Image (cartoon, rainbow, N blue to C red):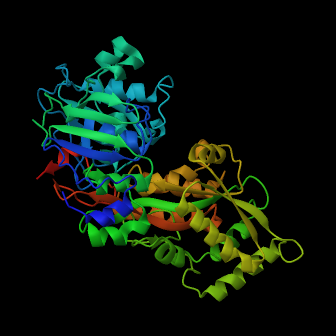
Amino acid sequence: MFRIALPLLCLLLAGCHGQPPVPLPRDILIRIADDEVKNLDPQKASDLGSIRIARDQFEGLTRVDGEGHAEPGLAMGWSISADGRIWRFPLRKRLRFSDGAPIRAPLFTAIFARLRDPATASPNASLYRDIDSVTADDAAVTVKLKQPMPALPELLALPSMAALPLHRIATAGDGWTRDRPLVTSGAYRLTEWRLNERIRLGRNPYWHGAAAPIAHIEWRPVPDRLTALRSFAAGEADTSSDFPPTRLAWLQRHAPGTAHVAPYNGSYYFVFNMSKSPFNDRRVRQALNMAVDRRWIAERLIGLGTKPAWGIVPSAIMEPLGDYRPSWAGWPAAKRQDAARRLLAAAGFGPQHQLSFDIRFNSDADHRRVAVALSAMWRPLGVDAHLFNSEASLHFASLRSHDFALARSGWIGDLAAPENYLAIHRSDAGAINYAGYRSARFDRALDQAMSEADPRRRLTAMRKAEALLMEDAPLIPISYYVSRSLVAPRVSGWHDNASNSHPSRTLSLR
């Protein structure tokens, strides 16, 4: 582990007593999680912290490698029909759960049925709506799609379709997650959970990949980024999934090589409530969009290599087409302001009728800074935008119930596929369509894109659907995310990637 000069460390760490870091055990990888696990059942968990720990324990037909790509998991590989709708996954031989029970192909038919069963109440079930059926014979699983889906291997790598111990669930019901050790199908199994303190994982003795490189994994929930940085700097952890952006320069000076910043498959935006005035008027939405200097916000205010966004699908996913850009993206600020002022006037807003509303955001220093910047950028138009913050659970409950005017939102892709970013704005997307956006034209364009099997034509059709969405302006794109991680020098096998996926089985200790 690196050593930080003691006076500097004492300034950074609260309660420093001058004690040097104690070397971490050689057989335990200690990882800081953003939050406590919400659910150990992979089909019932949707938060990032739970999914990361589920990926350490459960494996499906496919899995994610250390560079964020889908690869064969319990399946040996796959083959695809000419129309892109039928995929066949032959299983590896002699697969077993961590308790020794066999894993056979028909299990995946039952897992898919459980995922779609309303009684399971899986928040992830809608991701699999384009799967028509999952069938199996003695040697392989066959997935039939309603329409082509090039991203299917990535979709099946999500823990929701991993091999679950249905033999245990049949006898214990929801109580199966209280088993210690937990019955799992991946490289590790949970052996201990101390709430708000740690989750300890040990090797799965029956995993098909033999012994995982590191004997034990310990996940520690630390919601506060600065506290996580303090713990890491004190030598108490090997990895952390975030750090305050304002501390990057300090890390580069005093712990060089430990801070990792990389492009991330996520979009940051603010969403309008289109169900009521004033944002049921497209002219108002377009005016506010045009007046935002997202280059300044992304590059100067947020920094860390953050890219400005005029669309919602990250450029890496849309290669070789790149970012969506409206015709006005390159206009000077004064020209954009004039055009925005004319749109507001046409909508009835001006000196005699001021546009006034709240900018809602969940409590976070970065969200507040962006909201302040937006308010300042709109002030020359005579717009009076007030700040309104609340804690995260209340914030997103308000978005689902449409109790807001303009609100901070965003999307971290479940898949590196354009449709994953676009489909949440469909007319039939339900509560997750925060804006209440309804457009038959957009829905048709997205349906057409989804029906394309040819990769290039599919991408071009997706761009057309994104352009239609952006013309209607149900949201204000701000930037594309970057991931921020801390990795100790003794950890090897870490590869920065756009999905920010770093399964513990892909890491080792020097």
Q: In the figure, residue 445 lies in which quadrant?
A: bottom right
Q: In the figure, residue 488 lies in which quadrant?
A: bottom left
Determine the residue located farthest toward the top in the rendered image.
171
| Residue found at x 37% / y 41% | 51
Q: Is residue 385 left or right of residue 99?
A: right
| Residue found at x 64% / y 64% | 472
Q: Is residue 484 left or right of residue 215?
A: right
| Residue found at x 34% / y 41% | 220
Q: Is residue 194 left or right of residue 207?
A: right
Q: Is residue 261 visible?
A: no
Up-down relation of residue 172 to residue 82 (above or below): above
Looking at the picture, how far across and down is residue 217, in whole percent?
23, 39
| Residue found at x 49% / y 68% | 479
Looking at the picture, how far across and down is residue 260, in whole percent?
30, 64
**In the picture, which quadrant includes the N terminus?**
bottom left
Up-down relation of residue 193 to residue 331 (above or below): above
Looking at the picture, how far across and down is residue 332, in whole percent?
59, 88
Front one among 439 and 84: 439
Front one among 328 and 233: 233
Determine the residue located farthest toward the front in the rendered image.
17
Looking at the picture, how far across and down is residue 121, in whole percent?
50, 28
> What is the number of callouts on the image?
0
Q: Is residue 144 visible?
A: yes
Up-down relation of residue 274 to residue 209 (above or below): below
Front one among 343 and 203: 203
Q: Is residue 459 left or right of residue 372?
A: left
Q: In the figure, residue 158 lies in which quadrant?
A: top left
